[in-house]
Amino acid sequence: MSLREGVDRMVDRATLAIGLDPDTAKVIQACNMVSQIKFPAKVRGKVEVFTGWWAIHSAHRLPAKGGLRFAPVINQEEIEGLAALMSYKCAIADIPFGGAKGGLLINPCNYKEDELRDITRRFAVELARKDFINPATNVPAPDLGTSAREMVWIADTYKALFPEDVNQDACVTGKPINRGGIAGRTEATGKGVQYALQEFFRHPEAVASAGLQDGLTTQRVVVQGLGKVGYHLAKFLVEDDNITVIAVIEHDGVVINDGGLNIHDVRQHMAETGGVKGFPGGSYSEDRDEALLMECDILIPAALESQIHAGNAMQIQAKLIVEAANGPVTYEADEILRNRGITILPDIYVNAGGVTVSYFEWTRNLSHMRFGRLQRRYDEIRGHGYLDTLEQLTGQRASDQQRKTLVRGASELDLVRSGLYDTMRMAFQDIREIIRENPNINDYRTAAFAIAITKIAQSYYDLGLVESSK
Ligand code: NAD
C-alpha cells in the first residue's frame, strides 16, 4: 500500500468513527492538483533532465503550504500522500492554509553546492512560472534534503522574476533570519515535538495507559534520523527534559550508548565524517533495521516514510512511538501496533511545529515587521513602572536579577515559542477531548484525523463545495 493509500485508509477509519458522510470524505481525500515538471540543467558540461512535482491536496484555504524535498527516491504517489498529510496537519494546528507538497528527484550528495544552486534555481523558475511559488497561493518550506539555503535560492529567483511583488519575502518560509526568516523556525519542528511530548506527560492517565513511568526524565529514547528535525528534538529533550537518548540511527548505521549519547557531539561527528560510524562516544553497528527493534521506552522516527511496516511492527519493543517524520509507520503497521497496545503520537499532530512557525514567518513577511518590534520596549517600561510601585508599596527591593527577569519585554523568539507551545497544547487537548467524548475512537491517530476532517468538511460546507447531509 502506498503512503497515499495508507493516509486515505486512515481517513476512512476516522470517517466511520465520526459518521461523516462518505461523499464528503471522498472530496476531502482527493488531491486537487498535481503537476509533474521536467526541466533540463547543465551540470559539468552535460545536460541532465530533472523531474519534480508540486501537489496541492486542498485549496479551501490559501496559500497551499508544504515542504519541498530533494530526495533520490520519491514519486508522485508519495508527494500526493505527503500533501494530504499537510492538509490534515494544518487543520489540527489551526493554521489557515491548504495542504501541498513538492519534490525533486535528485541525490543532493552527488552535486557540488554551486551545481545544486543552479538546479534549484532552474526548478524554482519552472515552479514560479506555473504559480506554484507565490506568497498568495503556494508557499514551499524546507523538508527532507532541503534547508534555509535552498529557500534563499528559491526566494531570490522569485524576486528576480517578480520584483514588483511587495510580498515577495513570503513566497517561501524557512528562510534565514537575515533574509526574511523568523527566529525559531530552524528548530521549530523539533521544538514542537518536544512540546507535544511534554504535553503528553502532563496527562498522567495518558502516560499510564501507554505503560510508561511518570515523568519525561526517566525515559530511554531511540531516535532515527539526526537531521533538521531529529537533531534539534534530541538536543532539546536531553538538555531541557533530561531524557536519555540511548541510540541514534542514521543512514550508515546506529550508535548506541546505554548511559546516554551526547547529541551535539554525534552531530559534530556526522558533519565531519558524513555518518555515525566511528563516533567515539558509543558502540557502532551497521544494522540500522535491527536498531529500530531495540528495547526502549520511546522510539522517535525522524527520518523517512514507512520505516515501521508489516515486516517489523510485531518486533517493535518501544511503548510509545512519536512520529517526528511524516508517515514513518505504514497503515498495516499502525493496525498491528494498535492491536499490540503500543501508543502512537501521530505525525499530523506531532510534527506540526514546522508549519506552525512557517505560518508565523509568513504573517511576519506580510506585515514587513519583526514580531515584538512595537511593544517590546513599551512592555519593559511598564514592567519597571509596576515593579517600582510594588517596591514602594511593600518597602522591599527586588534584586537586580529579579528586576531583569520581571521587566523584560518579549523577544520575537519568546513570542514564536509561546505561539508554538500554545498550538501544540491546544491541539493535544482537542485530541484528548474527542477520545473522551467519542466511544468509537481510542487512539491518537484516529482522533487527530477525526478533528482534521471535521474542520475541513465544515470549511467545504461553508463554501458550498459539498452539501452537508445534516
Ligand atoms: P533532513 O534531511 O534534515 O534529515 C533527515 C535525516 O535522516 C538525515 O540526517 C539523514 O542522514 C537521515 N537518514 C536518511 N536515511 C536514513 C535511514 N535509512 N535511516 C536513518 N536515518 C536516515 O530532513 P528533516 O527536515 O529533518 O525531515 C525528516 C522528516 O521530518 C521527514 O519525514 C520530513 O518530511 C519530516 N518533517 C520535516 C519538517 C521540517 O521542518 N524540516 C517538518 C515536518 C516534518
Image: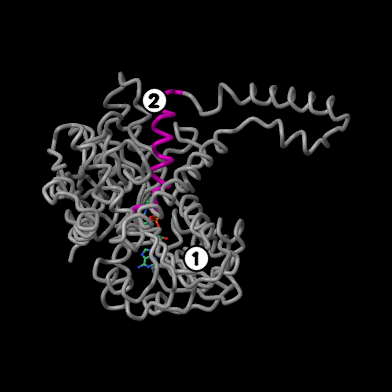
**Disc 2 residue type?**
Leu
- The residue wearing badge 1 is 207
Residue 404: % across, % down = 74, 34
Query: Which residue is depicted at the point 49% across and 33% down?
Result: 178
Q: Which residues are magenta?
A: 348-368
Amino acid at the residue labelled 1:
Val
The magenta stretch spans residue 357: yes
Instruction: Write down the residue under mark 2.
Output: 366
Residue 294 image-quadrant placement: bottom left
Please, is residue 178 above or below residue 217 in the view?
A: above
- Relative to 40, 254 lies left or right: right
Q: x%, y% of residue 283?
A: 53, 78
Label 1 residue SS: helix
Mark 2 falls on what kind of element? helix
The x and y percentages for residue 262 are 59, 65
Q: Nearer the viewer, residue 111 or 306?
A: 306
Question: Depth check: 235 or 192 in front?
Answer: 192
Query: Magenta part mainly helix, strand or loop?
Result: helix
Asked which quadrant contains residue 125, the reply is top left
For the question of whether residue 350 can be seen, the reply is: no
Q: Residue at x 22, y 45 (%)?
A: 42
User: Mark 1 and mark 2: span between their CA atoms?
Assistant: 41 Å
Q: Name the foreground residue: 192 vs 36.
A: 192
Q: Callout 1: 10 Å neighbours few (<14), some, many (20+)?
A: some
Q: Quick one: 43 or 459, which is closer to the camera?
A: 459
Residue 85: x and y in percent read 28, 51
